[in-house]
Image (cartoon, helix red, strand yellow):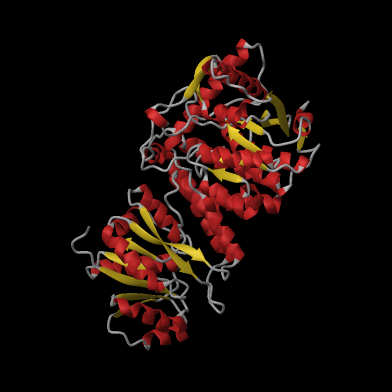
Amino acid sequence: MLADFSPCVVIPCYNHGAMMASVLARLAPFSLPVFIIDDGSDEATQGCLAALDHANVTLIRLPQNRGKGAAVMRGLQAAAAAGFSHALQVDADGQHQIEDSPALLAAARQHPACLISGQPIYDDSIPKSRLYGRYITHFWVWVETLSFSIRDSMCGFRVYPLAPTLALATRHPIGARMDFDTEVMVRLYWRGTPSRFIPTRVTYPVDGVSHFDALHDNLRISWMHTRLFFGMLPRIPSLLKRRREEHWAGIKERKGRSGLRFMLWVYQLFGRGVFTLLLWPVIGFYWLTGGPQRAASRQWIKHIRQYARQQHRSLPGRVNSFHHYLRFGESMLEKIASWRGDLRWGKEIDFAPGAEEAIAGGKPGGRLILASHLGDIEACRALAQQVSGLVINALVFTDNAQRFRQVMDEIAPEASRHVMPVTEIGPETAILLQQKLDAGEWIAIVGDRTAVNRQRGGVRRVIWSEFLGKPAPFPQGPFVLAAALRCPVLLMFALREEGKLRLHCEPFADPLVLPRATRQQALQQAVDRYAGRLAHHALIAPLDWFNFFDFWQLPEQPQTDEKEESQC
């Protein structure tokens, strides 16, 4: 902490004189010195400001309007000259929740080397054009910093550490108008000053005065992002050094719920073509910044190519790491589209030979789908339910991809209706699953990811089986569960082939039997058959492999205080 933490308030003002008395009244309980920077306002505003009767207010008047950024910098210079260490920037239009100032200042006192910013929580008063414009800026800031740590770069309610901010201004000219807030935050991040965020409500007054020039300010912001993008390129090595490696079981979900919403808004408004076009730079960012996942992708490509040569098979299309990432991005859309009913049978989706018969045929009653992370199990669930009216319950071991699931809930709430999160499969879980099978519902569980935590006795219950010519660990649990439930077992994959999503379904066992006398041998045979079919379908759609970790390595048990993530 800073022993001589000394904050003040800086308010840039341009023709907001009528609001200033209210803003100062809301600031009064905090007893902070205030610098008001009149940015060349009209005579009426000058009169309002001159009439303010506050002993701790310093009024600085600029003869001509120079822009919000220039006014803020003039205020920061005045604050530093007066001996202050930090400055709380508040906009003059009253839209900020000024009552949150103590929270921002407390964070600044605790983290004096950081820029502390409000993270807006908007109500319905925000214009949609502003909201979507922020999503675009969020995306470019993530690219320019190669980081998701900047959650919002446009909020003008923030606490500046004066020394690094003024040092930056002497080295680099910063945008003087509506481009200021974002540019100063990005450049401070480049120079080692991180940002921390405090949630705060933002309301746009009904009769508020906006100085945003739709043409000139948008052009100015576009030029700013162009400069920052090319400024980021030589900084890539230093920016990437801030990232650290983790195994898949400890990998937190890559952040960006606002970005997800923006991308899905693009899809809903403009269709898949524009979505796919915009997906390229997004995936490029993830590909550049996801070092461990990129290495795992390249490892997968190497193994599948070697296996294809051994099997005298040719792989379809361009099989490389970037297109592997791109396919994963496309699958995010397909999850949404399949649950929304946007995919049309015969055009965007169809059945592989025998798949429809495998789903519709057989004796009545529930079944267990042994799925995988090859292809899209969410699309399998959605499409199978559309075809036959089935209820397919997805058994998941933790709440993986929470941000994506939250967006899914907003756009396609049906997807989460039959998701069953469990920490381990015990007798209670088996009884519940049996009840669902008896009611004619289906169960889906993946068979290609080992359990994150050790089971009873402190051992990892896995079966090693050859996969693409190398031994790989597979979990025992799904196969033991299938045998215990004594129901028909199917394999199901939704793979991208020839421009369509093709649904594969085939019988695996009816039922899966693990005799007591030869249990281990029977279990090995079942896992071997599963691994063989997984390899077979991987050759059909190699880019649909969505395990971005070293699949042939048994992971170390992660720390118990970390939130693990695994998905059905």
Image quarter (top left, top right, bottom left or bottom right) of the C terminus: top right
Direction from residue 251 to residue 208 in the image, left or right: right
Direction from residue 491 to residue 185 in the image, left or right: left
Direction from residue 84 to residue 373 in the image, left or right: right
Image quarter (top left, top right, bottom left or bottom right) of the N terminus: bottom left
Report the residue that reaches farthest toward the left.
Answer: 3
Report the residue that reaches farthest toward the front.
Answer: 517
The answer to which quarter of the image holds residue 536 is: top right
Residue at image position (42%, 32%) is 247
Picture coordinates of residue 22, whole percent (x, y):
42, 82
The answer to which quarter of the image holds residue 65 is: bottom left
Residue 320 in sight from this viewpoint: yes
Q: Is the residue 392 above or below the residue 463 in the image?
A: below
Picture coordinates of residue 74, whole percent (x, y):
34, 68
| Front residue of this view, candidates 18 and 466 | 466
Report the residue that reaches farthest toward the right.
Answer: 346
Direction from residue 374 to residue 238 in the image, left or right: left
| Front residue of this view, candidates 555 and 199 | 555
Picture coordinates of residue 374, whole percent (x, y):
61, 30
Residue 330 in sight from this viewpoint: no
Picture coordinates of residue 407, whole percent (x, y):
58, 52
Q: Is the residue 277 above or below the residue 291 in the image?
A: below
Residue at image position (48%, 43%) is 253
| Front residue of this view, candidates 403 and 241 | 403
The answer to which quarter of the image holds residue 365 is: top right
